[in-house]
Amino acid sequence: MTKRILIMLAVLLLLFVLSYSIHNTLISTDLSFSLFHVYLFHVIAVAIIYATVEFVAENLPTQAGNAYLVLMCFKIGIFLLIFKTAVFENDALTMPERIALVVPLFVFLITEAIAVAKLLNSK
C-alpha cells in the first residue's frame, strides 16, 4: 500500500513539473489567476484522493469505488470554492484562461482515473 502511494506521488510530482513547465512556456498572455496554484491544487487533490481510495480499498474493498466518486465531487466543489473569483466573478474569461483551467483538470483527472482503476482492478 505505501509503495503504491509513494510511486503515485513520484508520478504526480513528475507530471506536475513537466506539464506546468510546458504549459507555462506556451502561454503568452497574462492570466487573471495563478496557473501554478491551479496545478498545485490538482496535484494535492489527486494525492489525497488516491491515498484515501487506497486506504478504503484496503479496509473496505467493496466501497472503494463509491469513495472515489464521492471524493471526486468534493474535489470539484473545493476547486470551485477556491477559484471562484477566477471562474465565476470574471465574466469575460479569454480562451487562454479557459484552456488554462481545463488542461490541468484533464491531465490530472486522466492520471487519477488510470491509477484508481489499476488499484481497484488489483483488489
Image (cartoon, rainbow, N blue to C red):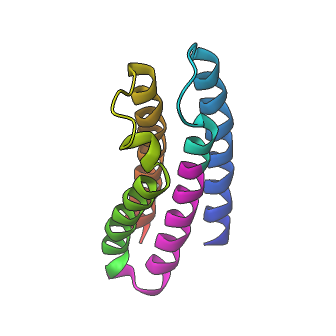
State the residue lying farthest toward the top: 28
In the rendered structure, the answer to whether residue 42 lies left or right of residue 67 reads right
Queried whether the magenta region covers residue 95, the answer comes back as no
List x then y, in percent, for residue 85: 45, 45
Q: Which of the image's four quarters has the C terminus?
A: bottom left
Q: Which of the image's four quarters has the N terminus?
A: bottom right
Residue at x-position 58% and y-position 60%? 47
List x then y, in percent, for residue 58: 49, 81
Answer above or below: position of 26 versus 49. Answer: above
Decide which of 2, 45 is in the foreground and name it. 45
List x then y, in percent, for residue 114: 42, 50
How many numbered marks, from 0 up? 0
Answer above or below: position of 73 versus 96. Answer: below
Answer above or below: position of 82 versus 101. Answer: below
Decide which of 68, 98 is in the foreground and name it. 98
Queried whether the magenta region covers residue 51, the answer comes back as yes
> What span is colored magenta in the figure?
41-62
**Secondary structure predominantly adopted by residues drawn in magenta:** helix
In the rendered structure, the answer to whether residue 2 lies left or right of residue 83 reads right
List x then y, in percent, for residue 61: 38, 80
Residue at x-position 56% and y-position 69%? 51
To which quarter of the image does residue 8 belong?
bottom right
In the rendered structure, the answer to whether residue 107 lies left or right of residue 25 reads left
Answer above or below: position of 47 versus 13. Answer: below
Decide which of 117, 108 is in the foreground and name it. 108
Residue at x-position 58% and y-position 15%? 26
Residue at x-position 49% and y-position 55%? 82
